[in-house]
Image (cartoon, rainbow, N blue to C red):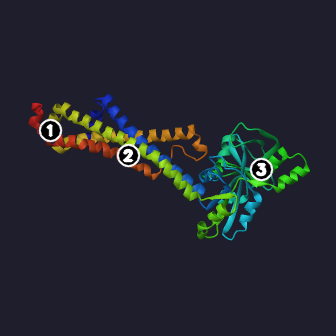
Amino acid sequence: MKTLWLAWRYLWARPLNSALNVLLLALGLASMTFLLLVGYQLEKAFDRDLAGIDVVVGAKGSPMQLILSGVLHVDVPTGNVPLKDIRELESHPQVAQIIPISLGDNFHAYRIVGTSINYIHHYNAQLAQGQLWTTPMQVVLGSTVARQLGLQLGQTFVGSHGLGAGGHVHGDSTYTVVGILQPSASVLDRLILTDTASVWKVHEDYTALDDEDRAVMEDEREITLALVRYKTPMAALTFPRYVNSSTDMQAAAPAVEITRLLHMLGLGTEVLRAFAAVLLLTAGLSVFIALWSAVRERRADLALLRMLGAPPRRVAALLLCEALWLGLLAGALGLLLGQGCTAALGWFLQLDSSLLVGGWVWPSDLLVVPALALLVSLGAALLPALGAYRVSVLELLQGR
């Protein structure tokens, strides 16, 4: 304990130099923390929201856009598809379940999603208050939506056209809140859910000129896309090909598209990881130079310690403890900076309300950050400590 205390006093004998070393090492560790946190949270979000969805069927276009818009709800959809075409797929021998998804409106930038009760059951979401909808124009709020907007059971609101704030308000079509979901850490937390018929009613009431026009619209009803679950894994070999070649729709496999997305993101991640490695290497060299200089500057102190009976290993341990303190401080600061940067990114890009990416998550992978801090600092101190261990008292007194 005396050695640790003395090392602490020695570390801050030159406060500016020590602070710069801590900051430089912390910046590299913060970069590693940021990469670990974003990667962990994205992976968790993808695994959670894509679970149990074998394929997504929607309008032809970009398959990745179809997945991002229909499953993760972070993009605009590729278009609409006829309801009758989706109903034909329900009778396909390889299809176990189809969950319809209808998009088009929002309330304060939170998407209003027309779907079926099965969508809620798919994520095993539970009600915190109220009940599920029983008629059109009733909505169930995700936990994040209810918390952010302050909506309560029985309150009413009107949606706006489009998937972002600022669209035309459907003033004649009022939604009523009948339920609020418990937090499920899934995509449902940030959605406003209602019956598919609600979406049709809003837009038909707004555009229909007369009863005949309304009848035509009912016959030509559309949905945005459908989430499909197979009866058997073997369907993955034939069902997407059937949809893509035999219909005017496209089938996109979430696993394939998300793998592509992660591969594209991986290129940027490698650049950031290399940048972090350069910072850590620079910090290690800085610590090495500082400790090596400390051995030369403290010859009188080291000589006094040796004359008072301190063995060589105690003198070497003093330098190692100084590096230990530096690594611990840099590790703690790096973790805090990394968490803060992740939280700031989530807030600035609104990822905390779309992919649930933010700070203050502590996965076990973060243990590598303090371990890396100690490895770099103690590794940089080995040679100076070895030099202090080998030097004799006579050399110290002579100042050589």
Disc number lying in front (2 or 1): 2
Between residue 168 and residue 145, name the one nearer to us.
168
Relative to 197, residue 333 above or below: above
Quarter of the view holding residue 60: bottom right
Between residue 155 and residue 109, name the one nearer to us.
109
The disc labelled 1 sits on which kind of residue? Arg
Looking at the picture, how far across and down is residue 297, in whole percent? 20, 30
Q: Is residue 329 visible?
A: no
Relative to 399, residue 3 above or below: below
Disc number lying in front (3 or 2): 3
All told, the count of numbered labels is 3
Could you tell me which secondary element the residue under label 2 belongs to?
helix
Q: Which mark is residue 370?
A: 2
Position of 380 with respect to 270 (left or right) is: left
Q: Residues within 10 Å of mark 2 (few under 14, many from 20)?
A: many
How far separated are the C-alphas under marks 2 and 1? Answer: 33 Å
Q: Which residue corresponds to the image point at 26% horizontal and 36% vertical from the top-left?
A: 6
Q: Which residue corresponds to the image point at 77% horizontal and 42% vertical from the top-left?
A: 157
How far separated are the C-alphas under marks 3 and 1? Answer: 83 Å
Q: Which residue is mark 3?
A: 199
Quarter of the view holding residue 133: bottom right
